């Protein structure tokens, strides 16, 4: 149990690191190149992708695949930490956490594959490549970043379960409630800009969560099996 908790703490810190890498590339490379500018047309964006295939592959690998894989570890670790105080809610968090991880990994695989597909088409017909890229981008954004509903629900449920059953600091749970709510609200078209609140807030939440899980003493973790056993004895 203690080993899984430490793995969860490391996974949470890696989650935060993937977000920081994502923002770092965004600020240092994509924004200066005008890749996210509304004035940049599809053909210009595809040309940028082709010229920076290696960078984009590595970037997508980190912010999607690495993020999704370690999210699975964190989901399991948090379940073990929350299941005694709030067993039903803890099971619900696992469901939404794994759904989110699956969507993130699927988005990453699509993005990595689609850059190669668009590059092959671009060599023969740049205009067609731009059209294909627009269609693929709509699917990718829908799955993994345009709407943060799955991630928002998971963080919100984890925070709620921890507030009810203990296991995490109250202040961390309140922050998780705000971050999770922002993710859920991003599903409303007019409130889509709250994704920035979700993204930046998630970095702080993952960092804080990782530190808490790594620093938690053994007695805190060991108390959970004891509580379970005592309840079992009372039931008998």
Image: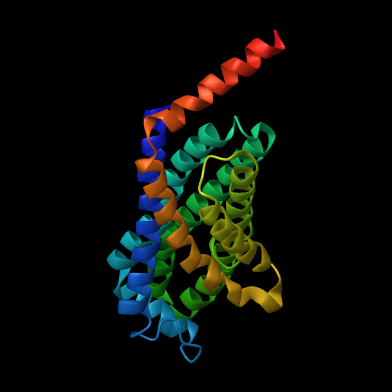
Rendering coords of residue 20 (x, y %): 36, 64
Vertical position of residue 55 compared to residue 42: above or below: above
Vertical position of residue 40 compared to residue 102: above or below: below
At a point 67% along the width and 67% down the height, the residue shown is 185
Image side of residue 153 versus residue 219, left or right: right
Q: In the depicted view, which residue is nearer to us: 152 or 114?
A: 152
Vertical position of residue 194 compared to residue 155: above or below: below
At a point 41% along the width and 82% down the height, the residue shown is 35
Image side of residue 188 versus residue 18, left or right: right
At a point 47% along the width and 68% down the height, the residue shown is 200
In which quadrant will I find the C terminus?
Answer: top right
Q: Can residue 66 be seen in this view?
A: no
Rendering coords of residue 74 (x, y %): 46, 42
Q: Can residue 98 be seen in this view?
A: yes
Rendering coords of residue 51 (x, y %): 30, 75
- The answer to which quarter of the image holds residue 62 is bottom left
Q: In the depicted view, which residue is nearer to us: 204 or 11?
A: 204
Q: How is the image coloured?
A: rainbow
Image side of residue 88 versus residue 120, left or right: right
- The answer to which quarter of the image holds residue 216 is top left
In which quadrant will I find the N terminus?
Answer: top left
At a point 59% along the width and 32% down the height, the residue shown is 83
């Amino acid at each position: 149990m203690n080993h899984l908790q430490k793995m969860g703490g490391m996974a949470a810190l890696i989650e935060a690191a993937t977000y920081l890498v994502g923002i770092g590339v965004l600020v240092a490379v994509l924004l200066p190149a005008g890749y996210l500018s509304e004035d940049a047309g599809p053909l210009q964006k595809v040309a940028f992708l082709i010229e920076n295939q290696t960078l984009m592959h590595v970037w997508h690998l980190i912010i999607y695949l690495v993020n999704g894989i370690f999210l699975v570890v964190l989901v399991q670790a948090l379940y073990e930490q929350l299941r005694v105080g709030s067993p039903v809610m803890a099971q619900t968090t696992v469901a939404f956490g794994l759904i989110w991880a699956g969507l993130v990994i699927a988005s990453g695989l699509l993005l990595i594959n689609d850059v190669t597909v668009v590059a092959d088409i671009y060599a023969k017909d740049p205009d067609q490549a731009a059209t294909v890229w627009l269609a693929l981008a709509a699917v990718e954004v829908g799955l993994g970043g345009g709407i943060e509903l799955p991630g928002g629900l998971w963080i919100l449920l984890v925070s709620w379960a921890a507030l009810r059953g203990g296991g995490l600091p109250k202040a961390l749970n309140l922050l998780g409630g705000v971050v999770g709510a922002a993710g859920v609200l991003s599903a409303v078209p007019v409130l889509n800009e709250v994704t920035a609140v979700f993204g930046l807030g998630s970095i702080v939440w993952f960092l804080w969560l990782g530190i808490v899980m790594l620093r938690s003493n053994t007695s805190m973790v060991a108390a959970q099996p004891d509580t379970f056993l005592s309840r079992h004895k009372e039931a008998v």
